[in-house]
Image (cartoon, grey):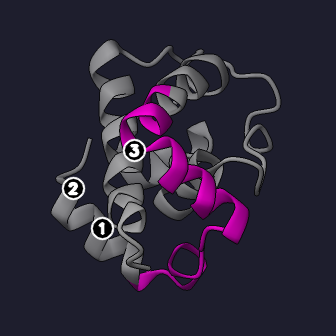
Amino acid sequence: MRDLDELFTALQQNPFRRRQTLTGKDLAYLQRRGLETVLQHAADLVARRLALAQPANDGKQTPWHGHPVFTAQHATATCCRGCLAKWHAIEQGRALTDEERRYVVEVIGRWLGPRVAGDP
């Protein structure tokens, strides 16, 4: 797992990751429900879609829109096990540990946090 300051500096260097933005609907949902609730959703989504050793449809399991967590996952390279391996040094082929699951949710929260207050 990477240092978050280092990770977010690297993510800002990547044009694909940098251009990810919340839709108006997803932003409104985040602001209405609040970061704490959305991060509870993130923990559930990570557990169901990402934490298994061999997730179903790996590489395609994260939709592009429909929930702020999905966009955050693409922006932070926490969308599939391949991205977790490449960007976060979390190897594929085994289930995520509890610590790794908390780390992924923390990364998502760090990206979503400023958006709750309306920062891009």
Mark nearest the camera among 2 and 3 is: 3
Return the residue at label 2. Answer: 4
Q: Which residue is mark 3?
A: 35
Q: Is residue 72 above or below residue 67?
A: below
Residue at left 39%, top 36%? 105
The structure residue drawn at horizontal position 39% and vertical position 25%, both measured from the top left corner, is 101
Q: Residues within 10 Å of mark 1 (few under 14, many from 20)?
A: some
- Quadrant in the picture for the N terminus: top left
Vertical order, 55 against 26 (above or below): above
Residue 95, image x, y percentages: 50, 14
- Between 39 and 10, the one nearer to me in the picture: 39
Q: CA distance from mark 1 to mark 2?
A: 6 Å
The reply to whether dot 2 and dot 3 touch (C-beta < 8 Å) is no
User: What residue sits 77% from the left and 37% below the top?
Assistant: 61
Side (left or right) of 73 relative to 59: left
The kind of secondary structure element at disc 3 is helix
Element marked by disc 2: helix
Magenta residues, start to end:
13-40
Residue 53 percent across, percent down from the top left: 59, 16
Is 114 on the left or on the right of 73, as rendered? left
Read off the residue under disc 1.
8
Q: Rounded to the nearest whole Å, what is the CA distance between mark 3 and mark 1? A: 19 Å
**CB contact under 8 Å: marks 1 and 2:** yes
Q: Report if residue 9 lies within the magenta region.
A: no
* Circle 3: residue type: Leu
Task: Name the amino acid type tagged 1.
Answer: Phe
The local crowd at label 2, few if under 14, some if 14 to 19, many if 20 or more residues have their Cα within 10 Å, is: some
Where is residue 12? Give x, y as percent.
Answer: 38, 80
Q: Label 3: few (<14), some or many (≥20) within 10 Å?
A: some
